[in-house]
Amino acid sequence: MPKDTQTLSCVRHELGALKDTLLRAVGMIENMERVLGNSNGGDGEAFSVSAAASSSQSARQPPEAAGIVRLRQKAEGANKTLRVELNKVMSLFCRIDLSYFFTNVPEIAVRISEFQSVAARTVRDAVNAFVSSGDEEKREDLALLLRLGADVDGKVDVGGDKGPETALVGAVRAGRMEVVEMLVDAGAGLEIPHEYRATALMIACDPEPQSHPEIARFLVSKGAVVNVEDQARMRPLHYAACDGGEGGAELVDFLFSRGASVHARDMDGDTALHAAIKEGNRRNAEILLDRGANVNDRNHQLRTPLFCTVLPYGTAVCDHKDIAELLISRGADVNARQWVANRPVLHDAALSGSADVIELLLDNGADVHATIETGRTALHFAAQWSLQVGESIDPQKKLRTAQLLVSRGIDPNAVDQQGLTALQLASILFSDVAGLAPLREYLAGLPGARGGVEVQGTGGRGGRGRRGGRGGAW
């Protein structure tokens, strides 16, 4: 491939400088051999030990030789890197023209056409064999395939719900640092996406099933992009924030040190702070706040991180009082409202039965009399039952929620736009929900309790009109 004279001259100059550097290193080694040879009266030949023999005897090496062994091993690794990089440079200047053989020597042409890289499936099988056994023989098998020229970036269907993935992603998922290093040294692409466009770094930061901080550090050191986004626009920091273990906090700190953006949002508008709180990870939330996360940042539904302390996650309700305390201490707005029906945090907490957070909100100035656009108070929400997470709601915490609200001055006989009190809502629309029985009994025992009337404007019992529907939703 033609290059201009100046470029070629520059490359040759740098090659000469590289050669001089290596020769100086060789000179230092030769000088040390002479000195040590003279010190014991020998001629230095005793130090001409083959690499194979030295390796096999490494377990019996005296302590004085350990440093040399480490240097030799590093030099062997450097040789591999040197060969790869020199080949890359050479390929920019030279290419092999095989057209003559294809035209004039059909026998050779046939053989050349049969050459191909080791298939991705073969590489993946070799990776799996080494990962599962750890045998040195399996390691050598994999190393041989990589030396022959393997398709390290090909995706292989591994079954289950993972979808096709590269050998590198599989090695990262297995947590095998040695295999990851081998694949990266063989040229495996760091940014080739797995299913949902997740990269190897994201897999290393993912707590499901386990994060791998050491591998994440290695990948970043090799050039993995820290602020890359997956299909849901989540970044590695989002993944790390979800990890409540020691590895998660380590990863969050590390990613920040490499330029991760604390304000990045996923497709729902959630920041890493939202993600950490949904998983109940107070430590990660604190690190994120210390690094500049906005305690009142809103996602696309206008939910601040404080909402995440009470909103259901998956099929479970949340009541993260410890995290709510942290957020409030950093200035979280206890009267913040989200987009859905302009609901305050207090209402969502009441729907979940998150009594611990409710008490904290009320202690810190949450408006107990706040209503939403349908006129419903937090007590109305306490009297509802979410069909989404009903099995995880604690009836006793629902009762405690109602008791807290009443004790702080909420009007139990306040009516919504349909003319319903909280008791009527629980008794008419949710009469068949056993989990609300303690709350219904409590409200019915309050002075002047009103219950048992027809629902206005919804076609009677069941309340399935646009504004009076059953089953409070988030």
Image (cartoon, rainbow, N blue to C red):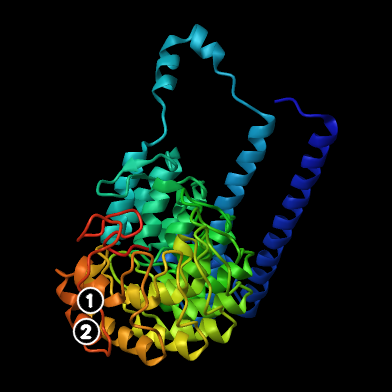
Nearer to the camera, 56 or 370: 370
Instruction: Verify CB contact (< 8 Å) between mark 1 and mark 2.
Output: yes
Residue 221 place in picture, x, y as percent: 58, 61
Q: Is residue 70 above or below residue 266?
A: below
Hey, what amino acid is under mark 2? Ala
Q: Is residue 117 above or below residue 35?
A: above
Q: Badge 1 is on which residue?
A: 451
Residue 178 place in picture, x, y as percent: 42, 61
Hey, what amino acid is under mark 1? Gly
Q: Is residue 204 left or right of residue 132?
A: right
Instruction: Give the numbered dot on residue 412.
Output: none
Number of residues whose C-alpha sits closer than 10 Å to that of mark 1, classed few (under 14), some (14–19) or many (20 or more): some
Residue 43 appears in the picture as rendered? no
Indicate the secondary structure of the residue bearing disc 2: helix
Gap between marks 1 and 2 measured at Cα = 8 Å
Residue 232 appears in the picture as rendered? yes
Residue placed at 42% from the left, 38% from the top?
151
Q: Is residue 101 above or below residue 59?
A: above
Q: Based on the displayed image, in which of its 4 quarters is residue 451 positioned?
A: bottom left
Q: Quadrant of the C terminus?
A: bottom left
Residue 253 place in picture, x, y as percent: 56, 74
Q: Is residue 447 left or right of residue 205?
A: left
Instruction: Give the numbered dot on residue 444.
Output: 2
